[in-house]
Amino acid sequence: MIGWLRRIFGNSSAPRSESLSAQSSAIEMEPFGGDDSFISIRELDFFGSASRSPDQRYVLAWSDRDQGGTLGGHRESGYGRYLLLESGVPIVDGRAERPNDGKVANNGTFIINDWRFGEGLKGRFLAYAETGEVILTREFNANLLNNGLSEDGSLAVCQTCHAEGPDNAILVVFDLVGARELASWQAPSGWADSYRFAPDGRSIELVYRDGCCARYSLTGEFLNRDEWSSERISSGNLWVIESAIKQIAQGHSAVTRDVLMTGLEAAVSKAHDHRSRARALRLRGEVFEAEGQLAEALRDYEDALRNDPAVGVKRKAATLRKTLAS
């Protein structure tokens, strides 16, 4: 198996795995942490992170450390290790440069983000069958943020961090049955914290810490844009509010004034620092000014300047003072 994989990929940095089909008995896994996110397997001299398939049948474990366990994290050499266990029986023992973010499906298909050796922005997405054979790999000129896998192992996604060029902050969708990349795009909703896949396999939800979900087709169509925008605006998300204000000015948004002002009130009241409060006040002042409510706009601009003199509304405030005084 190892030699075959090396011939396919043709270099020493290629992912490689070995089937452990001869192993027939379950071995003891000692969990660490309340969520079993780390395990120790003494028989295999292994300690690392772990995740389980939704039906709990499979465990995927990985360690971003060299074989001796002396070097971890950023390094120039020393392959990390990953293990796949079925009902406690190890069935795959593999190596990758810096394995991270492992996920395993109910059919034993598993994925890994390889953070790669050395300096620079780079990453490799890896998908494997239950046997340890490579389904596909995807190289990136960007660091990998996270990934997701459908329960049945048919679809996967990964998302990149900021980088120069076409790999900058993109979401990539993979068809693991057909062993191919389906699409990639920059998600308008931003980086997700986790992912959910529709039972019909036709859409993906990007899930965020605050509970909001952005739903996309497999080719990147934002299916619930207006609903998502309204939820994020109402919660006081300044990034989404700024985007909505620009879209409203261009006539490209269905967000109502009431929703926008509710969001701005929330943003002002829950701002965690002076700069954030100043930014929220500036945005609300700009809405008031656009509507001709000049006294309210001046009030917000002056309040914004008290919180952050560099917020960028000194000239606006001075102009409004003159207008209101005349």
Image (cartoon, grey):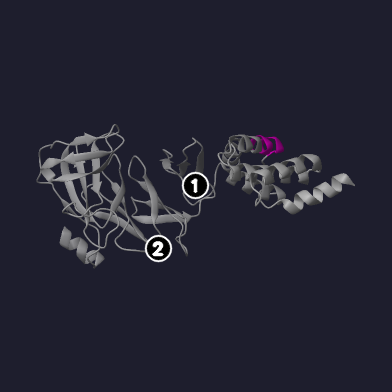
Q: Amino acid at mark 1?
A: Ser
Percent of width and height locating residue 44: 13, 45
- The span from disc 1 to disc 2 (Cα, nearest Å) is 25 Å
Magenta segment, prevailing SS (helix, strand or loop): helix
- Residue at the image point whose x is 67% and y is 44% from the top: 306
Taking the image as shown, residue 58 lies to the left or right of residue 166, namely left
Viewer can see residue 228: yes
Please give the range of residues in magenta.
256-263
Q: Is residue 157 visible?
A: no
The single residue placed furthest to the bottom in the displayed view is 10
Mark 2 Cα shell of 10 Å, populated few (<14), some (14-19), many (≥20): some
Residue 185: percent from the left, percent from the top?
Answer: 49, 55
User: Which of pointers 1 and 2 lies earlier in the amino acid sequence?
Assistant: 2
Is residue 258 shown in magenta?
yes
Which type of secondary structure does the marked residue at label 1 adopt? strand
Quadrant position of residue 88: top left
Relative to the observer, which residue lies in front, 91 or 289?
Answer: 289
Q: Dot 1, how many residues are within 10 Å of its Cα: few (below 14), some (14-19), or many (20+)?
A: some
Residue at image point 59% right, 41% down: 229
Q: Which mark is residue 122?
A: none
* Residue 109 shown left or right of residue 255 in the figure: left
Name which residue type carries label 2: Asn
- Find the residue positioned furthest to the top: 34
**Which quadrant, please, contains the N terminus?**
bottom left
Identify the residue under disc 1.
Answer: 217
Label of residue 141 in the image? 2
Magenta stretch: includes residue 73: no
